[in-house]
């Protein structure tokens, strides 16, 4: 009997979006179980019993429960190697992992929900100052990422002309920045790679507004039509 794959996700969670991309790229069908983060569903005993960390994503696969998006992507890569999320050469793998970790370690922790909530309460930071905090760290991180994308190893995607783990990290961070109205007009490499990725069906399948728990009012972030 095949054990169903289940992903605990929230439509605009960056970390869950990374895993949706990895699953979709590798053609792994997963049942998506929405966890309403703003309503605090991740802090309820029913979810904490599954993941005591109280975070999404959580992936049930192969009879296991896996947390931490980077670890999940690495697990998918090891157990389902094709199509590959990492290049075949060690130098390429190091570059892709460095790009991915730049977002996962240097940007995302500064902009995730609990960090922003802590600024508001108990620290009493106003919503305007909170937006300044967000834009500062996300802009600084993405500017550096843009410089990395100027390297010759970059192609249609973050590393060459084949999508990789780095693209699975970039797409969610850019969506998150757009939702928070961060100006990215001067980051053309990021815009180019994003636009190339948005042509791909598996990326479109994982897009936040393609999710069952996404609001119907999509505004300017609605999934753009294919070119
Ligand atoms: N490093 C973790 C980050 C997980 C994480 O922070 N998830 C966010 C959504 S993007 C979350 O569940 N936040 C709930 C909270 O901050 O209270 C990963 O990569 O999976």
Image (tube, rainbow, N blue to C red):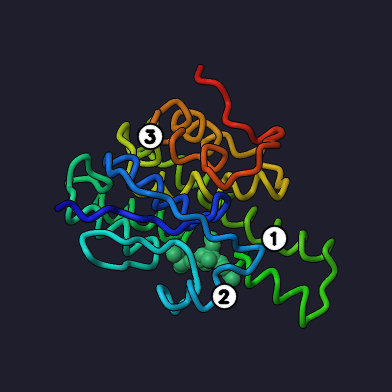
Residue 212 in picture, x, y percent from top left: 53, 43
- Cβ of disc 2 within 8 Å of ligand 1? yes
Q: Among all residues in the image, which is located at the extreme left?
A: 1
Q: What element carries label 3?
A: helix
The one of 57 and 108 positioned closer to us in this rendering = 57
**Image vertical order of residue 106 relative to residue 121, above or below:** above
Mark 3 to mark 2 CA distance (whole Å):
31 Å
Residue designated by label 3? 202
Q: Among all residues in the image, which is located at the extreme bottom?
A: 122
Query: Residue 77 vs residue 215: left or right?
Result: left
Mark 1 to mark 2 CA distance (whole Å):
23 Å
Q: Nearer the viewer, mark 3 or mark 2?
A: 2
Q: Residues within 10 Å of mark 2 (few under 14, many from 20)?
A: some
Mark 1 to mark 3 CA distance (whole Å):
29 Å
Query: Residue 195 vs residue 60: left or right?
Result: right
**Identity of the residue drawn at 52% across and 37% down:** 210
The one of 62 and 191 positioned closer to us in this rendering = 62
Residue 160 in picture, x, y percent from top left: 32, 36
Q: Nearer the viewer, mark 1 or mark 3?
A: 3
Residue designated by label 1? 134
Residue designated by label 2? 43
- Cβ of disc 3 within 8 Å of ligand 1? no
User: Can you see residue 146?
Assistant: yes
User: Can you see residue 109?
Assistant: no
The one of 212 and 79 positioned closer to us in this rendering = 212
**Identity of the residue drawn at 60% across and 67% down:** 110
Q: What element carries label 2?
A: helix
Reading the chain from its start, which is encountered first: label 1 or label 3?
1
Q: What element carries label 1?
A: helix
């Amino acid at each position: 009997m095949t054990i169903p794959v289940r992903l605990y996700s929230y439509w605009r969670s960056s970390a869950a979006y990374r895993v949706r991309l990895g699953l979709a790229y590798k053609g792994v069908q997963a049942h998506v179980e929405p966890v309403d983060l703003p309503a605090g569903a991740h802090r309820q005993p029913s979810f904490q019993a599954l993941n005591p960390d109280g975070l999404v994503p959580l992936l049930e696969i192969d009879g296991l429960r896996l947390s931490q998006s980077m670890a999940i992507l690495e697990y998918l890569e090891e157990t389902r190697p094709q199509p590959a999320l990492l290049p075949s050469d060690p130098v390429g793998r190091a570059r892709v992992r460095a790009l991915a970790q730049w977002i996962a370690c240097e940007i995302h922790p500064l902009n995730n929900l609990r960090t922003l909530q802590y600024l508001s309460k108990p620290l009493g930071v106003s919503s305007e100052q909170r937006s300044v905090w967000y834009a500062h760290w996300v802009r600084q991180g993405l500017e550096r990422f843009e410089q990395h994308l100027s390297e010759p190893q970059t192609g249609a995607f973050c590393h060459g002309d084949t999508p990789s783990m780095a693209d699975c990290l970039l797409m969610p961070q850019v969506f998150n920045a757009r939702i928070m109205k961060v100006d990215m007009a001067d980051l053309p490499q990021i815009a180019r790679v994003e636009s190339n990725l948005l042509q791909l069906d598996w990326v479109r399948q994982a897009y936040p507004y393609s999710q069952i728990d996404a609001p119907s009012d999509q505004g300017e972030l609605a999934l753009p039509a294919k070119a």
